[in-house]
Image (spheres, helix red, strand yellow):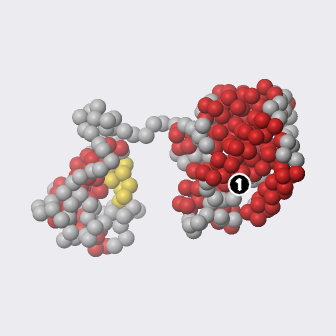
Amino acid sequence: MGWRAADWDRAAQIFQSIIAEAPHFAPAYIGLVRLKNSEHLVLPGLDRSEEVQQQALELSKVAVEVDPFDARAHHCFAWSLALGRRFDQAELSFGLALELNENDPWTLISSALGTAYCGKHREALELADQALRIDPNPSRAHWGYQAQTRFLCEDYTGSVTAAARALNVLPFLSAWHAAALGHLGYREDARDKARSFVEASRANWHGRTPPTEEAIASWLLRAFPIRDPADLESLYKKGRAAHVNNVELGRHGRWRSNVWTYPGASSLGSDARKGLRSHPTVKPTAMLEDALLDLTHRDDIVLDPFLGSGSTLMAAEKARRTCRGVEIDPLYVDVVLRRFEAATGIKPLLVTA
């Protein structure tokens, strides 16, 4: 499905004209807020601006004031708060919407997703299940919300099932589908879905920069109001294990800031300066060794796809890690082998398949 910005603008104009003629008609405010809260999601590459965020908040407040018993008004206000990362207030407004319309499947599933974004996974899953009990055969959009909710709640099988039933009703849904497949171990299927997401995003790109894979991924990760960083990481990281952190703010005697200082190639007698004879962009081995000590464990495999003069290999040997390196230039391969043998006394061995 290719959403167009012009259609979005035209719909907004219609709601604005209704508001001008009937300023006490809450559904017009609700419709306009929904447009403003979803535009950055359905138009790939478009970021939500502070101006749009403020407009959505103000309009949703008016909707609640005009009709405080309309669950949809409270619901729009809740989403506006969540998108502004005011999660505690958003939870309260989702709760008010549910109190006013607790048996409506759409209120239930939309509140489920909002609650999941707020980090309340158990409550979100209960709401999603309740929505399906009331309506076992919901719309494709409902299934799209189910897919996202269940992914955030770590029900990856349920997420895959829901995403398949949604049939890409939402432009970004194939990315969630791919992530869920990856968590279940279906790597080829996950790659296919990810490629489908990238191709569809490129075909309807509204960003200011070219639609590279990096730009598309960056837009995707910015688009959703996810409170818990671990939930956001689950979109691109398989598994829930914590990141390796052997420093722990100096707990084990080594401390790190965000500035690392080492003798570079301009320092007389430095390791990097000596390396300039062999490679124009040689890295300080000590820096790479510290990075490996910080973020890997002994005997872990470390990959360097651009081995160059072999600094990563040397660092891995010192840190007692196993390095796997790739180098396209035969001249630098010879440099790596000579350097490694001189430093370790181990004679390189050629192994053929």
On the image, the x and y values in percent for residue 49 come to 61, 54
On the image, the x and y values in percent for residue 45 come to 62, 60
Mark 1 = which residue? 39
Left or right: where 307 falls relative to 221: left
Given residues 36 and 261, the one toward you in this image is 36
**Exactly how many numbered labels are in the figure?**
1
What residue appears at the point 19 percent right and 71 percent down from the top-left corner?
Answer: 277
Left or right: where 322 falls relative to 114: left
Left or right: where 210 falls relative to 339: right
Can you say which quadrant of the picture contains the N terminus? Answer: bottom right
On the image, the x and y values in percent for residue 84 come to 61, 43
What residue appears at the point 27 percent right and 50 percent down from the top-left corner?
Answer: 260
Can you say which quadrant of the picture contains the C terminus? Answer: bottom left
What residue appears at the point 65 percent right and 64 percent down from the top-left corner?
Answer: 206
Q: Is residue 156 visible?
A: no
Q: Secondary structure at mark 1?
A: helix
Up/down of 173 relative to 87, above or below: below
Task: Find residue 126 and report its image quarter.
Answer: top right
Q: Counting other residues with Cα less than 10 Å from the Cα at mark 1, is it few (<14), some (14-19), or many (20 or more)?
A: some
Left or right: where 34 falls relative to 218: right
What residue appears at the point 53 percent right and 43 percent down from the top-left corner?
Answer: 233
Given residues 264 and 344, the one toward you in this image is 264
Task: Find residue 58 and report its image quarter.
Answer: top right
Q: Is residue 209 visible?
A: yes
Given residues 335 and 126, the one toward you in this image is 126
Q: Residue furthest left?
A: 269
On the image, the x and y values in percent for residue 229 come to 52, 40
Given residues 134 and 259, the one toward you in this image is 259
- Going by the numbered disc 1, the residue's amino acid type is Glu
